Image: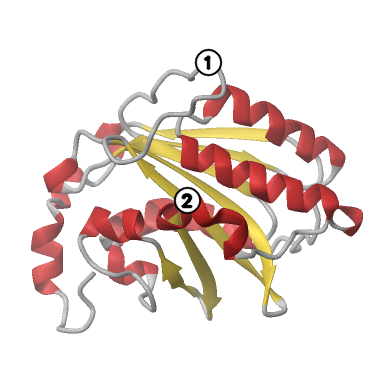
Amino acid sequence: MKTTQNRLSTAAIDSLNALSGDTLRFKPTCDLLRIWTKALEAAHDHRFPGFDPLDAGGILGHLYLLERDGERLRYRVAGEAVNDLFGANHGGRYVDEVIAPSLQDVVEPFYHAVLRGTVCVFKGKVIVSARRNAEFERILLPIHRGGTVQILGSLSVSGTAPLRDDGPIPHASEKGYHFVQIDPVTGRVTRTSIPHEDLPVDQLPYEDHLKRLPQGRRA
């Protein structure tokens, strides 16, 4: 298992600043990254910061916190825009209770990498049946909370989240899932794309999956 990092190097911060300009399209994502980076740069030795909701009052509806519970990831809290995507409150639920198992196998390794210190941007097209043509953008950031590293995330979905207004807007992603990861030590940027045809869309819409879940596990 890779060693958990507790800080971001100068090279990684430089990569993150460049990533903000050429990858992020939505204002809530950019705002959260700006808040987190400011706290990171103010922290001793660029250690991962904590998180104060008062610093992000204007975008709280787009934010969520994930914690590790054994091998599973659980939502500590989730904002209104996050809950709206699946039509239910995520707070207290596990990621594997919210998304279809086949999609979980695709995306969860990227989330676990954030617990080891990697910064990740996750973009693509929504494939929930009712909104499958919407564009989404997530940023996943490591924070210190309660003596552990947790994941602070932001979710922006086209139609409900405004585009950034602080400069040129990068092009939208092609169909499929797209991950951009920054190594916390080297600053190396890794881009991974999963074409739409390689995603388990034959197992959607989600309604069929949710009907099979026991009562109390439905998202």
Horizontal side, residue 22 vs residue 148: left or right: left
Q: Is label 2 in contact with label 1 (beta carbons under 8 Å)?
A: no
Residue appearing at x 53%, y 81% in the figure? 70
Name the mark on residue 112.
none
Q: Quadrant of the N terminus?
A: bottom right
Horizontal side, residue 193 vs residue 175: left or right: right
Q: Position of residue 123 (x, y in %)?
A: 42, 37
Residue position for label 1 = 168
Is residue 198 placed above or below 79 in the rendered structure? Answer: above
> Is disc 2 placed on a helix, strand or loop?
helix
Residue appearing at x 16%, y 82% in the figure? 214
> Is disc 1 placed on a helix, strand or loop?
loop
Callout 2 crowding tier (Cα within 10 Å): few <14, some 14–19, many ≥20: some
Is residue 86 placed above or below 66 in the rendered structure? Answer: above
Horizontal side, residue 149 vs residue 13: left or right: left
Foreground pick, 66 / 212: 66
Residue appearing at x 61%, y 31% in the figure? 20
Q: In the figure, residue 12 lies in which quadrant?
A: top right
Callout 1 crowding tier (Cα within 10 Å): few <14, some 14–19, many ≥20: few
Q: Position of residue 10 (x, y in %)?
A: 86, 39
Disc 2 and disc 1: Cα gap in Å? 21 Å
Instruction: Identify residue type, mark 2.
Output: Ile
Residue position for label 2 = 59
Q: In the figure, residue 4 lies in which quadrant?
A: bottom right
If you read the primary sequence from the N terminus, does the residue marked by circle 2 or circle 1 appear first?
Answer: 2
Q: In the figure, residue 175 lies in which quadrant?
A: top left
Is residue 120 placed above or below 70 in the rendered structure? Answer: above
Q: Position of residue 134 (x, y in %)?
A: 25, 35
Q: How is the image coloured?
A: secondary structure
